[in-house]
Image: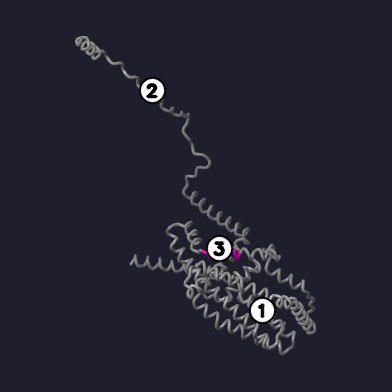
């Protein structure tokens, strides 16, 4: 039984194995046969000079398009910058409160916002009716005084002036341009004010978030300089707005108390207008002074002289005490520069341009000073390396 098994094993070992089937080879991609070699097309630019000039032209074209977009979107840009200015004031109040109240930043910002709302509510509830009555009388008084001045000028051969309320209003409105005519209505003004307040609160809640967001879009080598520049701009803007608010408070309360003391009519309204117009450098002081003097002379010559004295005293305190005290720690702006910026931004942005001209010029000056500092540092480094 064992022999047949061995024989079968040997036969199976001696039998040749069947060859395995080879895997089918993939066909090589066919080469595209061209009848003639490729030739350059009409868009092929081989000259390096032409490429460089086209790149420069593209940069200038992009800059022109950017300027055009800014002109078209001038109103939203104006509201955004006004929101930044509002945020700087809220942030300054929050930081100042942090020196005496060591609590979280959010709570301090809430206290500042509630204080602002409480002041506005108090003004509307307790002084609103009185100020509204006085505002209705102010137009009549001012127009009466203007007509008296026009009659005096006509008597002395200076010309025949036919003035009315509509003519004066149209002339004043025309000086500020028509770019912001859409915001001229009460509803538009209130909507813009609410947007500025909301935007300012959002930025003041966490300003570092927006600063990091803008820095993220810059190259790594430019971020350190950006942080330094924005820190200086924030410091300058906070100090500038703090000085402006302090000046508004001093001029408003001082004018109100002085008018009450000497018997000038509409003392509360004069104090409110003087305080509000103190936010606008140069032009605000002139407008408030003219209104104060006109109202003062409407009650008599003695009262008018007192009004002139009050105006000069208040402006002297603000110009020689408050402004130098603030300007020592912030950017010092030349009056002619600020006035020129007010004329420019007033024609471009309307009434709000007068309010924003000073902060815009201050920010530009801080940025230029930082760039000059960088250039001086680079020049010193280059000189030290060469020596």
Residue at image point 49% right, 44% down: 45
Q: Which residues are magenta?
A: 196-205
- The residue pinned by badge 1 equals 288
Q: Quadrant of the N terminus?
A: top left
What secondary structure characterizes most of the magenta part?
helix
Q: Secondary structure at mark 3?
A: helix
Percent x, y of residue 193: 64, 66
Q: Earlier in the sequence, mark 1 or mark 3?
A: 3
Label 2 to label 3, Cα distance in Å? 69 Å
Identity of the residue drawn at 60% across and 62% down: 77
**What is the C-alpha distance between the residues marked 1 and 3?**
33 Å
Residue 80 lies, in percent from the top left, at 58, 63
Mark 1, Cα crowd under 10 Å, few <14 / some 14-19 / many 20+, is many
Tell me if I can see residue 186 in this picture: yes
Q: Which residue is mark 2?
A: 24
Q: Which residue is mark 3?
A: 202
Q: Is residue 171 magenta?
A: no
Query: Is residue 35 toward the left or the right of residue 299 in the image?
Result: left
Between label 1 and label 3, give the one nearer the viewer: 3
Q: Nearer the viewer, mark 2 or mark 3?
A: 3
């Amino acid at each position: 039984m064992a022999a047949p098994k061995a024989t079968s094993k040997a036969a199976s070992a001696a039998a040749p194995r069947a060859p395995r089937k080879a895997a089918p080879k993939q066909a090589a991609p066919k080469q595209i046969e061209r009848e003639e070699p490729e030739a350059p097309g009409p868009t092929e630019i081989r000259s390096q000079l032409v490429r460089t000039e086209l790149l420069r032209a593209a940069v200038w074209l992009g800059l022109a398009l950017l300027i055009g977009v800014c002109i078209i979107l001038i109103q939203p840009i104006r509201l955004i910058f006004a929101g930044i200015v509002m945020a700087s004031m809220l942030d300054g109040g929050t930081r100042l409160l942090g020196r005496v109240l060591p609590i979280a930043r959010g709570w301090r910002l809430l206290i500042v916002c509630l204080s602002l709302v409480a002041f506005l509510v108090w003004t509307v509830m307790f002084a609103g009716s009185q100020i509204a009555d006085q505002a209705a009388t102010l137009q009549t008084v001012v127009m009466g005084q203007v007509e008296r001045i026009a009659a005096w000028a006509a008597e002395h051969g200076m010309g025949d002036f036919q003035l009315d309320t509509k003519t004066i209003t149209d002339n004043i409105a025309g000086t500020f341009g028509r770019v912001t005519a859409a915001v001229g209505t009460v509803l538009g003004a209130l909507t813009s004010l609410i947007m500025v307040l909301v935007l300012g609160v959002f930025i003041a809640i966490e300003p570092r978030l927006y600063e990091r967001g803008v820095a993220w879009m810059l190259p790594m080598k430019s971020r350190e300089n950006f942080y330094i520049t924005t820190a200086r701009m924030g410091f300058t803007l906070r100090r500038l707005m703090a000085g402006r608010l302090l000046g508004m408070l001093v001029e408003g309360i001082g004018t109100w108390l002085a008018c009450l003391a000497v018997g000038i009519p509409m003392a509360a309204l004069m104090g409110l207008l003087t305080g509000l117009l103190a936010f606008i450098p140069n032009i605000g002081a002139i407008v408030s002074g003219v209104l104060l003097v006109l109202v003062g002379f409407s009650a008599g010559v003695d009262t008018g002289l007192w009004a002139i004295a009050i105006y000069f005293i208040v402006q002297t305190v603000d110009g020689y005490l408050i402004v130098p005290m603030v300007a020592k720690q912030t950017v010092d702006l030349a009056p002619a520069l600020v006035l020129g910026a007010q004329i420019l931004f007033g024609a471009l942005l309307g009434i709000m341009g007068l309010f924003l001209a000073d902060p815009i010029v201050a920010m530009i000056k801080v940025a230029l000073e930082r760039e000059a500092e960088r250039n001086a540092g680079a020049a010193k480094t280059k000189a030290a390396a060469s020596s």
